[in-house]
Amino acid sequence: QVQLVESGGGLVQPGGSLRLSCAASGSIVSINAMGWYRQAPGKQRELVATSTSGGTRNYADFVKGRFTISRDSGKKSVYLQMNSLKPEDTAVYYCNANIRRTWLDGGTDYWGQGTQVTVSS
């Protein structure tokens, strides 16, 4: 079994900061890409940021310059530092990881349970 556990969501005022964390556990040989997605009420889930095993980072245009994704490979973790938060950033944020459970496995996507981020005064 593989689990992704997120933490760090909450309520913050506009212009504030939050740091999300996600840790993978279970039977894992290696992790390919890890990333963050979000889903606001009535909207589709959308990509926020991803980080490949080689260190390449990709950001959605609406978070460039405000959010930073980072990984700790030893801890099988990914983080999202969110600065200059706006009310439109309010959403449930989901951790995603493409994980290899055996060396013959090309990788399977796993999702965390989601953590609520609310930006409001």
Image (cartoon, rainbow, N blue to C red):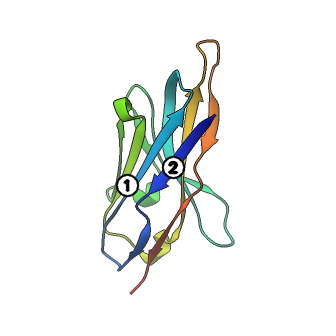
The image shows residue 60 at horizontal and vertical percentages of 47, 52
Q: Residue at x 64, y 18 (%)?
A: 105
Residues packed near mark 1 inside 10 Å, few (<14), some (14 to 19) or many (20 plus): few
Q: Vertically, is 54 above or below 84?
A: above
Q: Residue at x 51, y 28 (%)?
A: 32
**Residue linked to disc 2:** 5
Specify the amino acid type for callout 2.
Answer: Val
**Residue linked to disc 1:** 64
Q: Vertically, is 39 above or below 109?
A: below
The image shows residue 101 at horizontal and vertical percentages of 60, 23
The image shows residue 96 at horizontal and vertical percentages of 55, 44
Residues packed near mark 2 inside 10 Å, few (<14), some (14 to 19) or many (20 plus): some
Q: Residue at x 35, y 80 (%)?
A: 13
Give the side of residue 101 with respect to residue 78, left or right. right
Q: Please, what secondary structure does the residue beneath circle 1 have?
A: loop
If the image is split into quadrants, where does the N terminus sit?
top right
Give the side of residue 88 with respect to residue 98, left or right. left
